[in-house]
Image: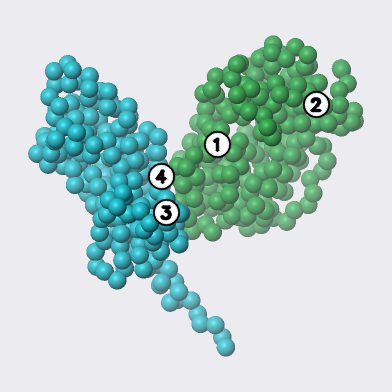
Chain colours: A green, B cyan
Amino acid sequence: MKKNKRAAIVGVPPLAVVRQLEAEGAEVVDLDMPMAGVSLERAADCLPKVYCAILRTVVANAVSMQPGRIFIDVGRGKCDGAVHVATILRHILPEVEVIAVENHDREPFGTPRCVTKMPLADKMQAITKSVTTSAAHPLFATCRATAGFWGVPPRDFSLLEFFPDTTHVFGWARCMENKTPDNSQLEEFFDPEIPTVFFTQSFCAKSALARYLASLHPCALAVDSDVAVGNSGRAKIQAFLELNGVR
Amino acid sequence: MLLADFGTSYVKLWDTSEDMPHLLATKDATGLTADIATGHNSQRRAKRSVNELTALAKGGGALIADDSYTLLDCGSRDIKFVRFERGRLKDMGWNTECGASMGFTIELLARYYHLDYQTMAVPRQAFAVTCGVLGMSRIFDAVIEGASEAEAVARFVKGIALNAFAFAGSPEKIYLSGGLCDNPLFVGSFPCQVAPLGRFVLLEGLRAMLDDEHQLRMLRPLPIP
């Protein structure tokens, strides 16, 4: 395998891959996260505009930074869209080694950030950052939950600002921290005792699961957003939390 | 204390020392500020701004005796709803895109074509329209094809009502909020029972919030000296 100091990941690659990159001393970059100065227009030539904003971000970042290697999870732990994005990246970036991986890890790594008291945006940032390292999670005290956020890390973190610091994280974001992205049992878990927002990116297949789980939850709101959360989405989240007495 | 609902076409005001709220055209309310407000620009024009969905839900709680209901607010520029089941919030929505300019367009059409909605019958058919702006061309097409202006506008209004009904989840009964409560063509176009609550529901919500907070303050124990 070609040694390159800059390796990019998409989704949550297997722990063995992360350890391998650490052993090589590679700089690991997460292509799912928006990068400063990179416009989504960079993806416009090869992806439809009406498409998952996370995958558009992946392509825009990849085109912009052109890392030596991209490890992209194309298994059940990511999504079908990643399979197609891997194909597209191979075609449009022939100099970049695009390596399709499937994460079947089953060993739970723990989810301390998901259940601790911390501003939700910081918590989500820390969770997404944690997928680039094999280091054990730091210890965090568990807090009593007053609200729940189920779903994936949103492209636009500003929608997280309405949630209290005592929000517990569920869904695929919890699977991320646990380093078991293909764990449907963990992904489907929620706490029926706390008001919970079920979030997905627009045009994401997980929106079916989000809506279904929200219908099972006694106090839930299903919300989706595309590139940036709109006024109506923000208002719905704020009103949902207010009207359910979440402070 | 002055409460306000800063709408796109009208500002609804309620001085809490008075019994009744009143209405002002938005274009005549420049420079007006309130103590507590909801609606567009409320963050700039009030000491305290309240989310419109929260104000709507609180208004529903104050005005509706049932504990299970759907309350739909049709404004000049957007539509929003809250649905409660057995006293608990079950669903809500706020459509700023596909409900765009709905109420405003309905009012505009009446002025342009010199129509009186109080005298217009509900048509059998409706246009399939998603918003005020996109639906205008359906009116022009129908008039060109020979329909009267009144008939074309009535079908447009019914299409808008059906769209709002679907947006609110197609309930058996809708409690309606907003200025369109006074439009019998619009109200009669819903394929369900409609209970119009008028245009001051959000103000009632602000008032209810104020009353709740006052009661909480009264219940709070006095500090020990």
Q: Quadrant of residue A187?
A: top right
Left or right, A60 with respect to A149, comes to right
Label 2 vs label 1, nearer the camera:
1
Same subunit: marks 4 and 2: no
**Vertically, is B119 above or below B153?**
below
Residue tagged 1: A228
Q: Indicate which disc residue B42 carries.
A: 3
Instruction: Give the answer, above or below, for where A191 lies relative to B219.
Output: above
- The Cα–Cα distance between marks 4 and 3, rounded to whole angstroms, is 24 Å
Q: Is residue A213 visible?
A: no
Front position among marks 4 and 2: 2
Determine the residue located farthest toward the left in the rendered image. Answer: B119
Are circles 3 and 2 on residues that touch, CB within 8 Å? no
User: Spatial distance from mark 2 to mark 1, Cα to Cα?
Assistant: 27 Å
CA separation in Å, label 3 and label 2: 48 Å
Q: Of tags 3 and 2, which is closer to the observer?
A: 3
